[in-house]
Image (tube, rainbow, N blue to C red):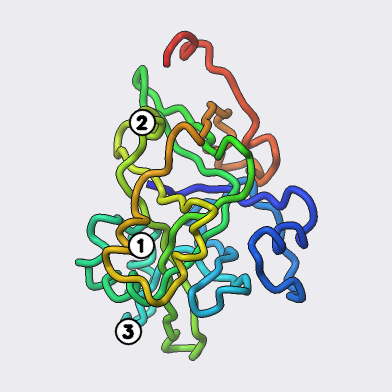
Amino acid sequence: MCYNYSLIIYKKQRDFERTYGVDQTQKNKMSSYYTINSFSLPKMPVISNENPYQFQIFHWGLIPFWVKKIEDAEKIRNQTMNARAETLFEKPSYRNLIKQKRCLVPASGFFEWRYILGKNYPYYIRLKDKKWFSFAGIWDSWKNPETGENVYTYSIITCEPNNLLRKIHNKKKRMPVILPWKTQRRWLDNTLSEDEIKSFLISYPDEKMEAYTISRLITSKTRDKNIPEVIEPYNYPELEGMD
């Protein structure tokens, strides 16, 4: 699954906006996130099919529009951080959204844990070109019954892993759907058929990705983890010589 990712603004925000082809007159200042945990219910930039040339700030953890009670919304969003590609067209929470409400979720990398020698070891995974990329996502708008506020939320779609992620994420064997840069805008096309949508829901080529172990700072409950050190390589002697 994908419960942690990073979004680093390497240079200027304008470079980030230009890369994604969005409106550069927006005044919302974006911060770098070296690690984001889904269960903190963060608000992150996405690009939706309804506003394909603007960054919008949505909450991670999808709340379907039909949820009536706040307590139900809080419960369901903890179960919808990710959406399995194989059941998107079947589950009531997703089957209309995958057809009508798709989004790009910009990222710099993501984190997974490898179980080996009786322990879990954290890894940071990114593209070899070290540039931004996008997860395939779905989104929805939910009206808070107490405040009347429209809350916009999203979920990251996951699929069967490639060989790299199969080795690392060796318990649950999943990976987020990463959209090829040249075709990611088409993901937002409102005219896509079901078969065309499904053609996107495949694992990204492992030869274009890289991964390395990082320190256990990522799991700290007391230290600030939103710092560059969280994604720095860290060697575990006991793993040396293992592929």
Q: Residue 175 location in percent, x, y?
A: 38, 44
Vertically, is 159 above or below 122?
below
User: Tag 1, which secondary structure?
Assistant: loop
Quarter holding residue 196: bottom left
Closest to the camera, between mark 2 and mark 3, is 2
* Front residue of 115 and 30: 30
Report the mark closest to the observer, 2 or 1. 2
Q: Amino acid at mark 2?
A: Asn
N-term-proximal mark, 2 vs 1: 1
Label 2 packing within 10 angstroms: few (<14), some (14-19), many (20+)? some
Where does residue 29 sit, x and y in percent of width and height? 75, 66
Residue 220, percent from left and from top? 56, 38
Up the image or down, 30 lies above or below 69; here it is: above
What amino acid is labelled 3 in the image? Lys
First in sequence: mark 2 or mark 3? 3
Quarter of the image with the C terminus is top left
Residue underneath mark 1: 80
Mark 2 = which residue? Answer: 163
200 to the left or right of 230: left
Q: Residue at x 55, y 39 (%)?
A: 126
Which comes before the other along the chain, label 1 or label 3? 3
The image shows a total of numbered marks equal to 3
Amino acid, disc 1: Thr
Residue at image mark 3: 68
**CB contact under 8 Å: marks 2 and 3:** no
x then y, percent, for residue 235: 57, 18
